[in-house]
Every structure is written in C-alpha cells, then in structure tokens.
Amino acid sequence: MQPIFLYGTLCHDPLRACVIGAEAETRPARLMDHAVHWAAGESFPLIVAQKGGSAEGLLLLDPSAEALARMDYFEGAFGYRLQDVEVRDGDRTVTACMYVPPKTGLAPGATWDLAGWAERWGPLSCLTAEEIISDMDRRSAADVARRFGPLRARAQARLNARQTAPTTLRRTARAEDVRLKRRSLDYSAFFSVEEYELTHERFAGGHGDEVSRTAFVSGDAITVLPYDPVRDRVLLVEQFRAGPYARGDSQPWLLEAIAGRIDGGESPEEAVLREAQEEAGISIWDLRLVGQYYPTPGAKTEYLFSYLASADLPDEAAGLGGLEGEGEDIRAHVISFDHAMELLESGEINVGPLIILLLYLARHRESLRSAGSGTG
C-alpha cells in the first residue's frame, strides 16, 4: 500500500493510534502549493491550494489493510475520500494518498495549530474516535455522521466522569472490580441503548455470577433555575415531554427548570448560559452549583449539573422560546416564589431537578434577597 499523507488531526499521535488501532511508522512530509488552516468557527482543519505554500504533515508508511479499513470508515463518515497526491519526502517527491474533504463551503480561518488543537480538543477527539471505531461493525458510517454531535457529547461526559465524587462511605472501586464480558449496541439514534454482560466484586468478597445490565446512554446535562431576588420571582419552562407520554400520563406537558445537554467541548457553565438564551431568551449571572448527580443510576448514564442563577425577571421575561430547528416548543412562566412552592406542594411540579432547586432556593432565599443579587 502506498503511503498516506496526513495533514490535520491524525498527525496527533494518540488520535491516530485510536483510529488505526496500533502505532505506525511515520515521517515528516509536506504538500507543496497548499496550506492548512482552521476551518473558520470549527474545531478541525482545512487544506487549501495556496501558490508557494507548504502544507506540513506526516507520511503514514505502509499502512496495513486493517489500518486502511479503519481510516476509510472514520474519514468516510464525513465524506473524506482518498486521492493521489505528490508530496515532498525530504529531498524527493513521492506519490501518496490523501483524504480529501468534501466541498462544504467552509471558509479557512487562522493558520492551523496542531499543538493548540491537541490541548483544547485532543482528549475529547480521542474518546469520540474510540467509540466510533469500537462500533464500526455495528454502526454504519452514515450513522456516525448523523450522530456525531451526540457521540461528542458522550465523549464529553466520559471526560467529566474522570472527576468522580468522593468515596468515604461507599466502596472505593478498583479497575479489576468490574469485568466486562460482552458489550452490545442494541439501538443507536440521538441516544443509544447498550447491553453489558459483566461480573463485579461483591460486598462479601469475590466476583458474583455474570449479570446482564442495560444502559440508556446519553450525554451529561445541566439544569438551571433563574431567580430574581428583588422581585422574589422564578422562571419555569413548560414543554411536551416524551417520557410522561410514553408512560401513559394524560398530562405530558411539564413544568421544569431550564435544561439541556452539555455539548462536546463545552463546560457545564457554558451550557447553562447557552440554554438560558435558547429556551427563555434571558441572561443570567451568579451561578451557584446546587449539586451534580445521577437522577436514574439504575438504567441511565445521564449526569446532571444543577444551578441556581440570578436573573432580571420582569413580566416581559415570560413568553415563547426554544430552537425550532431542534423541534423545541417552550413556554416560559415568570411566577412568584410562593406560587412556585404552592405548585410544588400540590404536585403540579413533578420533575426531580426542579424540586431539588426549589428546595435549595427555599433554604437560601433570605440570604439571596438580602444580598440584592438581582441588581446584576
């Protein structure tokens, strides 16, 4: 197999190892009359024709059939295809292949900075690639492209999970305490459903019998309750929810805190600010982390970061919102704290994260009001 010229993220050794499944011999090379730039506003590079330019990269020497199949799957999911190119290998010109991107209309931005990309996006990209490649026999390349956003959100959740909670009362787990026998991907769309056959260490000692466990897999998410301490008001959002509808609840429109998924490469705080704008069109400040937790650990991977935030909530803050492109139809309600507590007592508020946030607010309300946080 002729060598492959790499010019972008696959020049990052850890990502390349994830994709091709092994270390491989490489050496520096360059494609003349070309340059590599960031795609404007994106987290990946573009290679463009540029007279007198030199696109620096690597030659992947003699890739195996397996490595080529893995790279074709990974790159092909986004429309990249191999094309012959002439590159400079030291003082000689050699024929190689290069994955050429589809025409996207994206504009080139600043000069590509591999080290800067690796620091900001490397760990997330490696975890995303790891899942993509591990499921290449179960998921089509078209599915990868369609689910790339959720896959990156899942990878971000795995990065977040590295900052685990203390273990003072509960067991301090070791890597060998859970032995995974088999994993199967049973369903894959916006979310996925996975089956695990495993054994785990028992409290009495030793591993128990093999058990089957099913997990509904999603990314991490945020919830935030905006509170105006001057007017003593909160903002709640109302929308149709598929979960209550599927359960058979005759009232599937729920009152909730603002909520949303944490996208790949996004911090919980960034997600909070974004969702407040998308769902309610408001600005918030003085974010207080109320808690971070698994709402349904028996079956769901979802992990929530819940916040209380200060906001200016005049009557005009109520209204309609949400992103039409994501099928969101959201109504924002601005109500008094006392009204919110009445709804909690009556059971009309029946969503766990909002209940937690209102109880936290009830505990700290007087101090928040006396501090006058609502002045911005």
Image: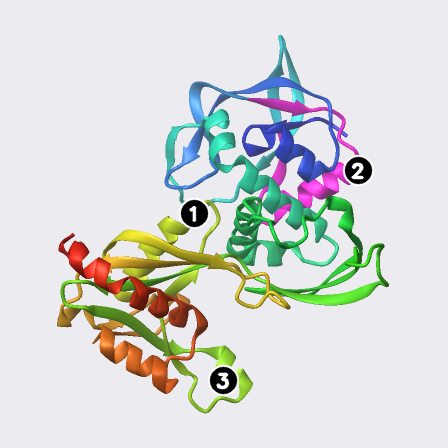
Residue 245 numbered tag: 3
Q: Position of residue 85 (x, y in %)?
A: 61, 27
What residue do we see at 22% from left, 58% from top?
368
Q: Position of residue 144 (x, y in %)?
A: 60, 54
333 lies left or right of 87: left
Q: Is residue 238 above or below residue 40?
A: below
Instruction: Give the distance between the C-alpha atoms of the residues marked 3 and 1, in whole angstroms.
Output: 31 Å
Q: Position of residue 300 (x, y in %)?
A: 60, 65
What residue do we see at 73% from left, 22% from top?
25
The foreground one among 8 and 207 is 207
373 lies left or right of 4: left
* The image quarter in which residue 298 lies: bottom right
* Secondary structure at numbered mark 1: loop
User: Which of the marked residues, 3 or 2, is nearer the chain's N terminus?
Assistant: 2
Per the image, the residue denoted by label 2 is 65
Residue 58 numbered tag: none
Residue range highlighted in magenta: 57-84
Q: Amino acid at mark 3?
A: Tyr
What residue do we see at 58% from left, 43% from top?
80
* The image quarter in which residue 289 lies: bottom left
* The image quarter in which residue 106 lies: top left
